[in-house]
Image (tube, rainbow, N blue to C red):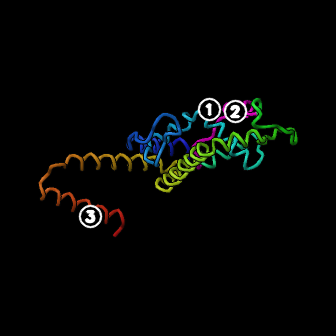
Amino acid sequence: MRGHHFFSHAHEFAGRQGRRGWKGGFGGFEGGRGWGDMFRAGRMLAAGDIRLIVLALLEEKPRHGYDLIKAIEERTSGFYAPSPGVVYPTLTYLEEIGHAEIESEGGKKLYRITEAGRQHLAEHREEADAVLGQLAQVGRKMAQMRSWFGEDSEETEGAYDELHKARHALKLALRGKRGASADELKRVAGILLRAAKDIGGQ
């Protein structure tokens, strides 16, 4: 899939869904209602959220920094991958406060959670589970959006643009029929039914 093309469509779609469900930061993305806010999640993860995510992933198994980046990316179906400039300072901080420790493995740093880190995570388990759940929710929505838009190629990009323009034009036309007479609404319904059958090849 062409990443830029997919996200341009996804962002266009998200922007039309409103801004419900956001209460400041990633932790406020609730109930899957805020499609538009999903696209702000990556840059609004608070430092405390990142630390809890990293600790929770280290609790599962020891990891390298790159493994943590990939694990978060996988949980969001490729939507959000924290940069090394976010993950490695977080790991350094967790090591400095005694929540993680390092061992060398083939010239790479392998990070493990410490007992102090486990205790901290246990004390904030509800918050950690909520943040991880929200990552998974973003992943589910991204998978759903991919199933809607399909795998794009260079040849289909222009066709998708035309499809979205047509869908938008139809939405505006239907909005203009509010308050129309019963006969006019029946006429419009007939047009839509014929179009649906034509599109479906029936």
Residue type at mark 2 is: Thr
User: Between marks 2 and 1, how big is the CA–CA gap?
Assistant: 8 Å
Number of residues whose C-alpha sits closer than 10 Å to that of mark 3, classed few (under 14), some (14–19) or many (20 or more): few
**Mark positioned earlier in the residue sequence (2 or 1):** 1
Q: Which mark is residue 189?
A: none
**Image quadrant assignment for residue 91:** top right
Identity of the residue drawn at 36% across and 65% down: 200
The residue that disc 3 covers is: 194
Question: How far from the left and from the top, in percent, is residue 191?
Answer: 23, 60
Labels 2 and 3 touching (C-beta < 8 A): no
Q: Is residue 80 magenta?
A: yes
Labels 2 and 1 touching (C-beta < 8 A): yes
**Image quadrant assignment for residue 109:** top right
Identity of the residue drawn at 14% across and 56% down: 184
**Mark positioned earlier in the residue sequence (2 or 3):** 2
Closer to the camera in the image, 176 or 92? 92
- Nearer the camera: disc 1 or disc 3: 1
Identity of the residue drawn at 68% across and 30% down: 85
Number of residues whose C-alpha sits closer than 10 Å to that of mark 1, classed few (under 14), some (14–19) or many (20 or more): few
Identity of the residue drawn at 72% across and 30% down: 93
Residue type at mark 3 is: Arg
Specify the segment rendered in magenta. Answer: 76-94
* Left or right: 22 in relation to 194: right
Question: How far from the left and from the top, in percent, is residue 95?
Answer: 77, 33
User: Between marks 1 and 3, how big is the CA–CA gap?
Assistant: 53 Å
User: Between marks 2 and 3, how big is the CA–CA gap?
Assistant: 57 Å
Q: Secondary structure at mark 2?
A: helix
The residue that disc 1 covers is: 47
The residue that disc 2 covers is: 90
Residue type at mark 1 is: Ala
